[in-house]
Amino acid sequence: MSTTSPQSLAVFTSGGDAPGMNACIRAVVRTARMHQLNVVGIRRGYEGMIDGDTVFLDERSVSNIIQRGGTMLKTARSARFMTDQGLDSAAAVLRNLNVSGVVAIGGDGTFKGARAFTSRFPEFRFIGIPGTIDNDISGTDFTLGFDTALNTVVEAIDKIRDTAASHDRCFFIEVMGRDSGCIALWSGLAGGAEEILLPERNTNVDDLVALLRKGSSLGKSSSIVIVAEGEQSGGAAEVAAAVRARLPHVDTKVTVLGHVQRGGSPTVADRILGAKFGTWAVEALLQNVHGAMVGVRDGKKCFIPFEHAVKSSEPLDPELYRINRILAT
Ligand code: F6P
């Protein structure tokens, strides 16, 4: 261990939980222990950092969690961490525990917090791990939890399709994604949706009605429309009402999948991503790499400075949308 290596390393999860966070915590703890570091788990994200809600973790503390959804460290969104008082209390807690390296698992809000903290207290070294089902962080192709959420959504679409076809109905299925249509786009294509409505595109009800009419004229007796939570006209209920007003003979139904998308046992892809991210994050701190989020780009490890690890402004892959348009005929 070099002289700049942390004495103790802390790990926490923050923001919305995501499947694979536990697999990632396990990787952080076991990699750190292999390098003889003490590991402190901070409960409830930045809230727990302020309150000193911590627990020492060793190899056995993270047994039997690889398959569990949620996060064993719990999570929270913290308004107090945006105040000087909150930052000062958190610094006192970390100093008291002799922590200098911190692994922060969460979304863009988590990394904003890390930046605010380390610009006030540069002696602490933070490395970030993207954990959010939304897959909306710049610089990484995938975030932890996205694949599991997609599989949950597609399983639900398949089930709804059974009843939609049996009753000749049109279902509007709302999926998560306040600011991002990633879950909607990927699950819509995988679930064979007639149309996918995204926060990133304006919804045109005329076009949607025309598309549903065309489907009907081509012999479709049921249809599935995936609506992202952040869709601009207000979500699935609003879009369904607008369509119902124009097509009163169509039997429309709305299903909001909600927080079921955040839970469940992580998929193989999320367990592997959690293992990679957790191991890479600790190794990065040991090599004095910090102030950045670890990510994957084209299958390879990369580091994105916190100032660029923000909500993605990259447009969603237009190819997925184009292909769905072809296949939904
Ligand atoms: O960021 C993940 C996410 O699940 C979003 O898709 C969703 O809009 C939001 O969190 C919901 O947050 P909460 O659980 O705090 O209501």
Image (cartoon, grey):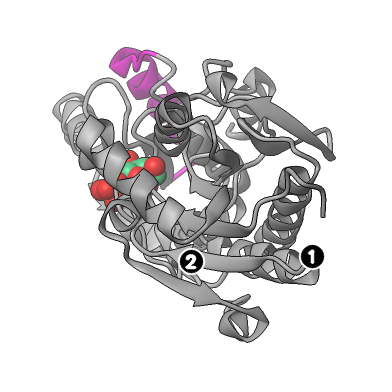
Residue to which mark 2 is pinned: 41
Q: Magenta stretch? A: 202-221
Q: Please, is residue 277 above or below residue 114 in the view?
A: below
Ligand 1 has an atom within 8 Å of the beta carbon of the residue at disc 1: no
Predominant SS along the magenta part: helix
The N terminus: image quadrant: bottom right
Q: Nearer the viewer, residue 169 or 122?
A: 122
Dot 2: element: strand
Q: Residue at x 30, y 53 (%)?
A: 76
Task: Tell me if residue 15 can be seen.
Answer: no
Cβ–Cβ below 8 Å for labels 1 and 2? Answer: no
Task: Please indicate whether residue 74 sits to the left or right of residue 151 in the image.
Answer: left
Q: Please, is residue 245 above or below residue 51 in the view?
A: above
Q: Earlier in the sequence, mark 1 or mark 2?
A: 1
Give the percent coordinates (x, y) of residue 109.
39, 34
Q: Residue at x 50, y 24 (%)?
A: 310
Q: Nearer the viewer, residue 328 or 279?
A: 279
State which image quarter holds ligand 1.
top left
Q: Please, is residue 235 above or below residue 4 in the view?
A: above
Residue to which mark 1 is pinned: 35
| Residue 226 colored in magenta in the image | no
Task: Please indicate whether residue 44 sits to the left or right of residue 297 in the image.
Answer: left
Looking at the rendering, which quadrant does residue 294 occupy?
A: top right
| Amino acid type shown at disc 1 | His
Q: Residue at x 42, y 39 (%)?
A: 226
